[in-house]
Amino acid sequence: MDPTAEETALKSLVARGIRIPPQPRVLLELEKLLRRGKINVRSLARVISQDPGIVALLFKTVRSPIYGGGRDLDSVEKVLMVIGMRQTVTLVQAMAIANAVPKATRASFETFWSRSFDIARLAALIAADRVSVCNIFPEQAFLVGSFHECGVPILMQRFPEYCDGIDIEQACQADHLAEEDARYNVDHCAIGYLVARHWKLPDFICTAIQLHHEMPEAQAGAVATVVAILQLARHFYHLLLDLDHPSWAWLREPVMNELGLGFENDGNYFDLIAERFHEVR
C-alpha cells in the first residue's frame, strides 16, 4: 500500500471512530537510536527499561528454549547480549502492542492477549526449529504471532457488542471475516495490516498479517513461509487446548509442504514443540 492510500484508509477508520494505536514512546525512542546510529547495549537497555511490562515479557521470552533457557539472566543488558540488539528491538515491537490497545473490557482483553502470546511463542519455537529450511527467525515469527489478530481488540474497543454471542476464539476464525465486513465495513485483518504499517513493521510481516487466514501461494516467498509458521502455531494452540480447528483440514497440506514437514510425522512434531513450549511458563 502506498503512503497516500494508507493515509486515506487510516482517516476512514478514524472517521468511524476506530482508533489505530500510535507507537508507544519506547518504540519511538528506539527508532531514534537506530536512525542516529547511536545504538549500543547500554543505550538500548536504558530505553527498554522505561517500560516494566515489556521488560517482564522480555525476560519471560528469553527463558524459552529458543534462547537456551536464559535462567541466569538478571539484567536487560545481559538479555541483549544473548539475543542481539536488533532481534531485541523486534521482540519489543511484538510485546508493545498488548500495552498499546486500551483495555476496555479487561477480562476479554486479558484472554485475548494471553492467547496471542501463546501463539507467538509457538510460532517462535517452530521458526527456531525450521530456520535452516525456512529462513524465518524466531523473533520475526514472534512478531507476526503477537500482531496477527491485533485488529480484534481494536474492534472490541470501538464496538462493545463485537464479541456478543461468540467467544474470543470464534472471533479469530476465518469464517467470522464476512460477518465483520457486513456489520462494520472492515475486518480485523485489514485493521491489523494498517496497525503493522503504521508501526513500520517489515513489509512481508504486514502482508502476512493481512493474509493470515489464508495460505498464500509458495511463490509469495517470505510471506507464505511466515504465514505457514503462524498457521501451524495456531493449530498447535488448538491442540494444546483441545479446541476445534475446522480450517486445518484444508490448510494442513500447503502449510506442511511450505515448512518441509512430512504429513506422517505431524503428530510427533506437535509433541516436540509442545514439550518445548511447556519447558518455561
Image (tube, rainbow, N blue to C red):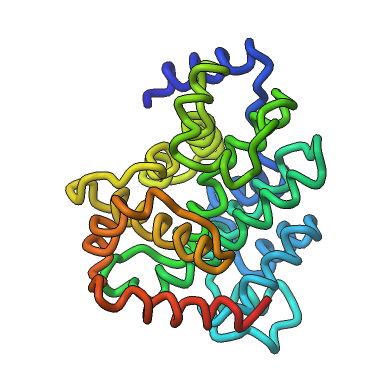
Task: Locate residue 35, reporting x and y percent.
Answer: 53, 47
Q: Which residue is pictured at 72% across the width and 59% down the height?
A: 54
Task: Judge by depth and name the residue closer to the eye, 29 or 218.
Answer: 218
Foreground residue among 260 and 87: 260
Which residue is at the front of the view, 72 or 247?
Answer: 247
Position of 54 with respect to 118 (left or right) is right
Residue 230 at x, y percent in the picture: 42, 56
Residue at x 37%, y 23% (from the top left corner):
2
Residue 215 horizontal side relative to residue 193, left or right: left
Q: Quadrant of residue 150?
A: top right
Q: Is residue 22 visible?
A: no
Query: Compared to 265, does 11 lie above or below?
Result: above
Q: Residue 140: x, y in percent?
A: 45, 59
Q: Is residue 125 above or below residue 139?
A: below
In percent of width and height, residue 1 lies at 37, 26
**Residue toward you, 169 or 244:** 244
Give the residue displayed 64% in from the left and 79% down from the top: 63
